[in-house]
Image (tube, rainbow, N blue to C red):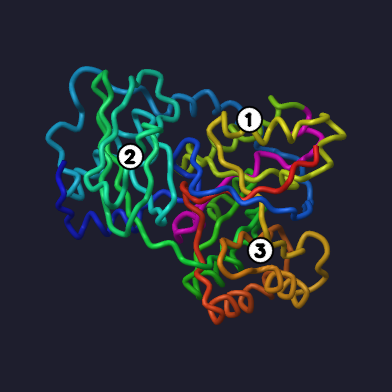
Amino acid sequence: MKKRFLATVLALALTGSLLAGCGDDKQGGGDTQQTTETTADSPQDEADPDAQADDAQDSQADEDGGKASSGEDPIAGLDYNNADDWEKIKKQAKKGGFMLSEITMLTGEYVDLKYQFAKKVGDTTWESSDPSIVKVSKHHDTRIKAKSPGTAVIEGRSDDGFHTYCMVTVEQKPKSTIYLTFDDGPSRYSTPKVLDILKKNDVKATFFELKPAKADRDLTQRVIDEGHTLAIHGYKHKYDQIYRSDETYHKNLTKLQKLFYKKFGQWCTQTRFPGGSSNTVSRHYSQGIMTRLSKKVHEWGFLYQDWNVSSGDAGGANNADQVYKMVTSGIQKGRSNVILMHDFSGNDKTINALQRIIDWGKRKGFVFRAMTAATGEVHHGINN
């Protein structure tokens, strides 16, 4: 395995890494945090005029990744140190259903390297160019773990000839982190204002979106273009529909996952249950469904994130001052703080509190980050 890294490729890895659930199968960086945070319900979605057109595209999205090649190696002779070759390697990886060509991890985090929808990929052996930076697990042969800061390349070769790479950049894990997360967008009113504030402060966040209206897809694209993490809240937010059965919830995830991939090239696996995993409203439609879903989402290849700090902006906080107080009083040193906020339309209380929250966090020495495909999960207790 080659160990030299040209500056152009390193820059590419740093700026183009797949973030927070966009680009891998089941992951789980570090230990899962348990929290007793109560459910924060948010507004239901309205009628969906685009649903029929999106339904018609679902079968096409299933095939977008193509099949892994057999026989001749399509990336033979390509050099991952060369920027043009690297783009070709990534393109071939996607054709084979491998979505994690690039990722930024923190020390101690891990991620599983798997193919998403390829139908013909044999057993794959993964090898690290520098195990002191990123190590392939001895006990989980598809899992890599970040050991120390630096950059390493993971090479994968399957027994039927598929060949690919994963460029991994490892950064030192901060002692105290703030993950700003926004649910229920995008909205034409709130999302641009939130993005403007984040851009002004050079802060990255995670957006758990619902299905964007066609007129608002530019907002989702802006989230991606400005380096934030796109994640899945659900195609719909109507509790009586999505929590009717395990199958209806699964469809609510995969339908949006396919749309994000088809329209934006993002294969997202980080998700958040509408109402959180601790919600009780779901018991009205299917007794015990959250107990089942909290296990099945992992089997389906997703991670789920709750929160351990609530802004109260969907209920509990009446103005920006109260949002600011709820957030800053809930943040703790020495842990990853996952803050629940919303960018639904008209959410002025969060918009008007956001700058002060960022100023407070920086002043107190916290590091703001967007979630990645290796970010550890934060879970509530299950109430149904």
Q: Position of residue 375 (x, y in %)?
A: 50, 51
Taking the image as shown, residue 181 lies to the left or right of residue 109, namely right
The part of the chain drawn in magenta is: 221-244
Image quadrant of residue 165?
Answer: top left
Taking the image as shown, residue 33 lies to the left or right of residue 384, namely left
Q: What residue would you read off at disc 3?
A: 190
**Per the image, is 76 magenta?**
no
Image quadrant of residue 92?
Answer: top left
What SS does tag 3 mark?
A: helix
Q: Position of residue 224 (x, y in %)?
A: 47, 54
Q: Position of residue 22 (x, y in %)?
A: 47, 44
Q: Nearer the viewer, mark 2 or mark 3?
A: 2
The residue positioned 67% from the left and 58% from the top of the image is 308
Q: What residue would you read off at disc 1?
A: 296
Looking at this view, is 263 or 11 the one in front? 11
Taking the image as shown, residue 26 lies to the left or right of residue 207, namely left
Q: Are marks 3 and 1 in contact (CB under 8 Å)?
A: no
Q: Is residue 93 visible?
A: yes
Graded by Cα atoms within 10 Å as few (under 14), some (14 to 19) or many (20 or more), the crowding at tag 3 reads some
Q: What residue would you read off at disc 2?
A: 136
Q: Please state which amino acid type lies under the numbered disc 3.
A: Ser
Graded by Cα atoms within 10 Å as few (under 14), some (14 to 19) or many (20 or more), the crowding at tag 1 reads some
Taking the image as shown, residue 310 lies to the left or right of residue 181, namely right
- In the displayed orientation, state which residue is furthest to the left: 77
Q: Please state which amino acid type lies under the numbered disc 2.
A: Val
What SS does tag 2 mark?
A: strand
Looking at this view, is 68 or 255 the one in front? 68
First in sequence: mark 1 or mark 2?
Answer: 2
Q: Is residue 213 visible?
A: no
Q: Please state which amino acid type lies under the numbered disc 1.
A: Lys
Spatial CA distance of label 1 from label 2 is 26 Å
